[in-house]
Amino acid sequence: MRPETRTDLRFAALVAGALAVVGALLGLVWMAWSPAQPKAFVYAPGKEFTYEESEAWVASDGRFFVLTAVTGLVAALLVWFRVRNRGPLPLLGLIVGGLAGAYLTWYVGYLTGGGTSTGKLNTIIEHLPLSLHTHGLVFVEPALAALLYGMLVAFATHDDLGRPDPVRDALVSVGLDDHPQYGWGDRDAPGALQKGDFPAQ
């Protein structure tokens, strides 16, 4: 494995780990920012219905979306500006870390939000736990991170994404007066040594 590949792997693992840690911390932010969850009435064992009309579930999901979407976009920008590690491996780190981070945001918020979803028959649950009702929102963070990173790659000025390449930089650059028959030229017209090979017209 090339040293550059090992470096990119380490950086991708670092990105994934950092996003997971940030996601766990965002779970606390999501819990603190979300409104109190509604009460519920237990009408059958293991079943309940909302006792109070509330928009708390929608608000909680919306705030989860905002937190994870912003995290994915910011992470993609930060990874892109790390020029020497641009490539597919950091993108993989964004996707894996974004998915893990979003799930940890959900799980930590659920654990720290308090409340319960179980109770005795015909009783009122005072506080339902904080939960994500639109489960597909866990894919927002990795999807936006991959989308933004891919757009930056698509509109990059250089095919090499601007990252340094020691092998390429060590090659001899082509000059305007070099000749293609010797393997280093790039001119279409015949050079001085070529003109003598053609018969006079």
Image (tube, helix red, strand yellow):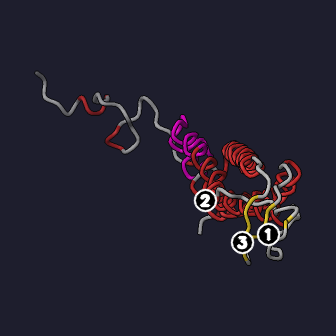
Q: Residue at left 89%, top 51%?
A: 32
> Over which residues does the magenta segment extend?
148-169
State the residue position of label 2: 92
State the residue position of label 1: 117
Of residue 63 and residue 182, the one placed in the foreground of this image is 63
Of residue 106 and residue 42, the one placed in the foreground of this image is 42
Q: Residue at left 30%, top 33%?
A: 193
Say whether residue 120 is visible. yes
User: Which class describes the residues within 10 Å of circle 3: few (<14), some (14-19), or many (20+)?
Assistant: some
The quadrant where residue 13 appears: bottom right
Q: SS class of the residue under badge 2?
A: helix
127 horizontally vs 1: left or right: right
Q: SS class of the residue under badge 1?
A: loop
Please tell me which of labels 3 and 1 falls first in the chain: 3
- Extreme-top residue of the structure: 201
State the residue position of label 3: 47
